[in-house]
Image (cartoon, helix red, strand yellow):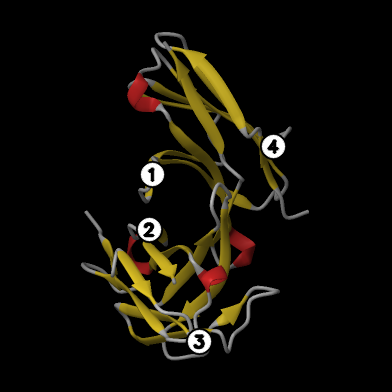
């Protein structure tokens, strides 16, 4: 299949951790990405993970990859109001001319 | 670091006119660039793959005569929306592959097109 799947909405209280999940289908994916898009703005690359890695941590962000289940997650620790955005999971498919295929995006809403 | 620049960042055009969006790689050569479109509150859909010196490869369902792509140099690809209609209003974003940097993909800032 072609799809990259992620849930559309997530609400989290300020200060809690946010976990955004993503599943993909293409086993040839080499890199998996998380992008952030704020309202009216372009894409911001948050982090990425190579397919032979299980975990990557970068400050408040932790990416977990389960290659067997083709499952990717992004954990944002100590969620802040500035984290309110749409988060896109994306995969780079080596056997498709390095095309990057995006999920539909998860809208993260921060509760006070 | 590498930068991909898109211009214009926002454009308003009248129905029936054509509008050109540029995508430039500023400090690397990009033999391949990709064009995406984002509908409101939806994901980014790949429109076409642009290869320098050859015809673009369009994804299924994308009208090649409607969305003209030209990749005339190693640092510039253009997307021309011809005979624009209000339903073409969208966010268009390009990305470029840096072959000399492990084929890393860099995205532009995107261009908001509004057709009135």
The disc at residue B83 is: 3
The disc at residue A45 is: 1
- Do badges 2 and 4 share one subunit? no
Q: What residue did someone put label 2 on?
A: B107
Label 2, label 1: how far apart the Cα atoms are: 9 Å
Q: Considering only order in the chain, which callout, 1 or 4, is on the residue closer to the N terminus? A: 1
Res. A109 in view: yes
Residue placed most toward the observer, B45 or B104: B45
Q: What residue did someone put label 4 on?
A: A70
Q: Is label 4 in contact with label 1 (beta carbons under 8 Å)?
A: no
Q: Residues within 10 Å of mark 1 (few under 14, many from 20)?
A: some
- In what element is the residue under mark 1? strand
Q: Residue at x 42, y 91 (%)?
A: B53
Q: As displayed, is residue A104 above or below residue B109?
A: above
Q: As displayed, is residue B13 above or below residue A71?
A: below
Q: Is label 2 in contact with label 1 (beta carbons under 8 Å)?
A: yes
Q: Chain of mark 1?
A: A
Quadrant that contains the N terminus of chain A: bottom right
* Side of B102 where A99 appears, left or right: right
Q: Residue at x 52, y 42 (%)?
A: A88
Q: Position of residue B50 (x, y in %)?
A: 48, 78
- The quarter of the displayed image where residue B72 is located: bottom left
């Amino acid at each position: 299949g072609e799809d990259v799947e992620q849930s559309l909405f997530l609400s989290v209280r300020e200060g809690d951790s946010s976990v955004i999940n993503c599943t993909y289908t293409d086993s040839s994916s080499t890199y998996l990405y998380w992008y952030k898009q704020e309202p009216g703005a372009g894409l911001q690359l948050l982090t990425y993970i190579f397919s032979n890695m299980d975990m990557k941590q970068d400050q408040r962000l932790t990416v977990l990859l389960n290659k067997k289940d083709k499952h990717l997650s992004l954990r944002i620790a100590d969620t802040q109001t500035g984290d309110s955005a749409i988060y896109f999971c994306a995969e780079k498919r080596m056997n498709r001319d390095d095309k990057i295929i995006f999920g539909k995006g998860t809208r993260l809403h921060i509760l006070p | 670091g590498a930068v991909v620049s898109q211009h214009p960042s926002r454009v308003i055009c009248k129905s029936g006119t054509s509008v050109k969006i540029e995508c430039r790689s500023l400090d690397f050569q990009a033999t391949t660039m990709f064009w995406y479109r984002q509908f409101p509150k939806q994901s980014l859909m790949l429109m076409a793959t642009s290869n320098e010196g050859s015809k673009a490869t369009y994804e299924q369902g994308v009208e090649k005569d409607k969305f003209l792509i030209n990749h005339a140099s190693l640092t510039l690809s253009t997307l021309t929306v011809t005979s624009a209609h209000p339903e073409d209003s969208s966010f268009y974003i390009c990305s470029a592959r840096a072959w000399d940097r492990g084929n890393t993909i860099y995205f532009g800032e995107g261009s908001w097109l509004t057709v009135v």
